[in-house]
Amino acid sequence: MKTSWGFDLRSLNAFVLACKTGSMAAAAQRLHMTQPAVSYMIRNLETSLGARLIDRGRRPFSLTPRGAFLRDAAEQILAAAQRIPSRLRELDEGAPERLRIGIVDSLACPFVPELLSSLRPSLDTLLVSAGLARSLREAFLDHRFDVILTNDPMDDVDGIVRHPLLSEPYILLLPPVLPPGADHADLRSLAQTLDLIRWSSGSFIGTHIDAQIRRLRVDIPRHFEFDSSDTLTGIVAAGQGFAIMTPLCLFNSVARQGAARAAPFPGPPFSRVLQLVSREGELDRVSQKMARIARRILRDRYLSGMLRIAPWLRGQIVIGNPRNSG
């Protein structure tokens, strides 16, 4: 039903999804509707507003200036509307009935069981999905997750709240025996004698490491890429190369029990921050509680294990806000 303003939330949502996906057909699929139905809704929206929103004479999907304005305004309206139910529940001092959480792959057991144990009494339904930071980001921005635990700083996203959980340095993962001439204190020498087993270029951690290598002006060929810490660790343990990762990735790798060994990263140190991200004004108390729980789990169940793997990391791994560590 159209309001006196010329639009409703349903038609705005269809329009925004068409803009995001770049086609009516893709938007229809996401909405579980037919393409003609979505096209009709958007044409009806144009008629009600008295404005042409889509340039139908161009391919691919192209917006008019008025369409671009409505897309930006509609995204804000829809985001505010989606916050209303959870905000009302919070005002009533109750927890949400259902919580959808996305967790970066490098967090596994015992994190998820511990989190479930702590949140279970106050939730009816808890949905947890693990994935790469990029996929978590996309799902969060598309409102398919309420909260994400990620190593993506999301500095380009407005209207979110970041709760720092863990800061950790990048380290080397070396095979049991280095070949003659390899020097793990010099990245260039190491790369000349061993293959670098890289993270997938589509992952945030892979992008972060690649940027650091470029800053150091070290030319390392791209031969092997993987998106699993288990796979990287197993390959290194088999003596087929070296890798760059973080203590948390190594700790959570099933293959860490192999012969691979950790060493400091050669050159200027660089690190990543794991954080809990929620939407501003939405589930504020729940996200604060989750952040406290997450820090406790990392401190009690992870930190000592990571230091057993590499005692020289003491003082370099910070639980909470790294800015407050000094």
Image (cartoon, grey):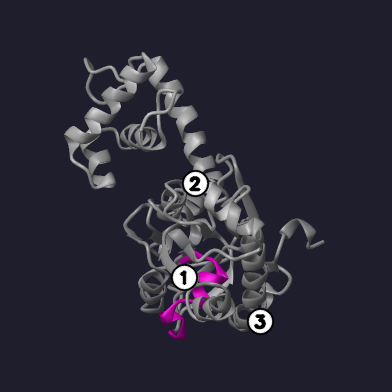
| Front-lying residue, 310 or 135 | 135
Looking at the picture, how far across and down is residue 210, in whole percent?
A: 47, 50
User: Which residue lies under the disc numbered 3?
Assistant: 300
Q: Amino acid at mark 3?
A: Asp
| Quarter of the rendering occupied by the C terminus | bottom right
Above or below: residue 110 compared with residue 265: below
Q: Amino acid at mark 1?
A: Leu
Q: Earlier in the sequence, mark 2 or mark 3?
A: 2
Image: magenta residue range: 242-258
Q: Residue furthest right?
A: 326
Checking the image for residue 146, the label placed there is none
User: Which residue lies under the disc numbered 1?
Assistant: 126
Observer-side mark, 1 or 3, equals 1
User: Which residue lies under the disc numbered 2?
Assistant: 82
Magenta region includes residue 18: no
Residue at the image point whose x is 62% and y is 63% from the top: 286
| Front-lying residue, 303 or 64 | 64
